[in-house]
Image (cartoon, rainbow, N blue to C red):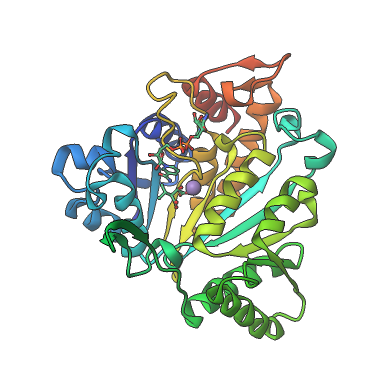
Amino acid sequence: MTKKICVLPGDGIGPEITAEAVRVLAALGLGFEMETALLGGAAVDATGNPFPEATQKLASEADAVLLGAVGGPKWDMLPREQRPEKGLLGIRKHLNLFANLRPALLYPELADASTLKPEVVSGLDILIVRELTGDIYFGQPRGIETRNGERFGFNTMHYTESEIRRIGRVAFAAAQGRGKKLCSVDKMNVLETTQLWRDVMEELAPEYPEVTLSHMLVDNAAMQLVRAPRQFDVLVTGNMFGDILSDEAAMLTGSIGMLPSASLDENGKGLYEPSHGSAPDIAGQGVANPLATILSAAMLLRHTFHEEEAARRVEMAVKKALAEGLRTADIHAPGTTKVGTKEMGEAVLRGL
Ligand code: NAD
Ligand code: IPM
Ligand code: MN
């Protein structure tokens, strides 16, 4: 059986951080076949299309996709269809990657890196399950038009009950395998779409009698995440709320450079990428934190290839690098050693 991974470095820090994750995957000696293709701004520059056909083909044929990040100011003025982000949304939709898992886990070594007090975040281990192919991100109609003599911007939030049910099942199953608590986040006091979200979550609950389901309005959830984040086990929410809450949760782990993610379809195929973006402000300097991408590679091992032991080896190697006192700039604190992207990657390789 061939094990094919499509590697999409993308833009900004993307190539720097994926290079380290690729080295880690190669070092495991599991016989992965890795092939690189273009996505995002890099693809726009080369072909005019942020998700070119060659990339569609390679990504469809591969068992898994490893992605850096896309986007940057260079492409922000292009028509929307040609922007890097369109390529990312395109590949998610094309591969039907509706389930985005974003685990926020605090490594004890990084308790001081968080902007929150150590006693608030220590022992943190939560999972955000974000719906990824629906919601206002994909809803039609959308646009900017002139109406009654002025510009009018509009987007459409919608979910079908089957879309809600399938992400709900992923979240309930995840909770069943962890702390057995699921908090569904919505805005049912204002938005009908999310009233349906809450209703469907309630309908699913009897199928998972071991899991305790609760509900929280998104504004309160944003507050509770920084007030008392350990009250949560698994959170499930829609595409837009999940985008925002997962960046917030990232800061609980010390840095957005620590938060991996897996975007999965119904058959175990997945796209694995850090939750952060292309960080144009530090791109090309060799200082970006590669750990979120390396930890995404661990998720790739676990979810697509069922290589649990290898996944744990990678996670342990990350832990070792942190225990050695090595820190990239984003997680650096007095008394630790500041290193660059490559050195951090090398420390993880040593740890393997
Ligand atoms: P960002 O996540 O790229 O950066 C936010 C801040 O976090 C910056 O200060 C950056 O330097 C820092 N940061 C991010 N990743 C880091 C890492 N690994 N190590 C150290 N510091 C890190 O968000 P942004 O600035 O809002 O967006 C920049 C571009 O990235 C935009 O074009 C946006 O559309 C795109 N983006 C892409 C993805 C993706 O490809 N999945 C995700 C988010 C944003
Ligand atoms: C993310 C990013 C993307 C999103 C953007 C770049 C389209 O912020 O993966 O979190 O909003 O989903
Ligand atoms: Mn985001």
Q: Nearer the viewer, residue 93 or 292?
A: 93
Residue 180 in the image, given as x and y percentages of width and height:
76, 68
- Report the front residue among 75 and 114: 75
**Is residue 128 shown left or right of residue 307?**
right
Rendered-image quadrant of the N terminus: bottom left
Residue drawn at point x = 65 percent, y = 85 percent: 203
The residue closer to the viewer here, 182 or 146, is 146
Question: Position of 86 compared to 312: left or right?
Answer: left
Residue 62 seen in this snapshot: no
Judged left or right of residue 326, residue 264 is left
One can see residue 79 in this view: yes
Q: Quadrant of residue 308?
A: bottom right
Q: Is residue 216 above or below residue 37?
A: below
Residue 48: horizontal and vertical position, in percent? 15, 44
Residue positioned 57% across, 33% down in the render: 352
Residue shown at 36% from the left, 31% from the top = 12
Please provide percent x and percent y for residue 314.
57, 40
Residue furthest out toward the front: 149
Q: Quadrant of residue 122?
A: top right
Expressed as whole percent of the image width and height from the top left, the position of residue 44 reads 20, 42
On screen, 110 above or below 228? above
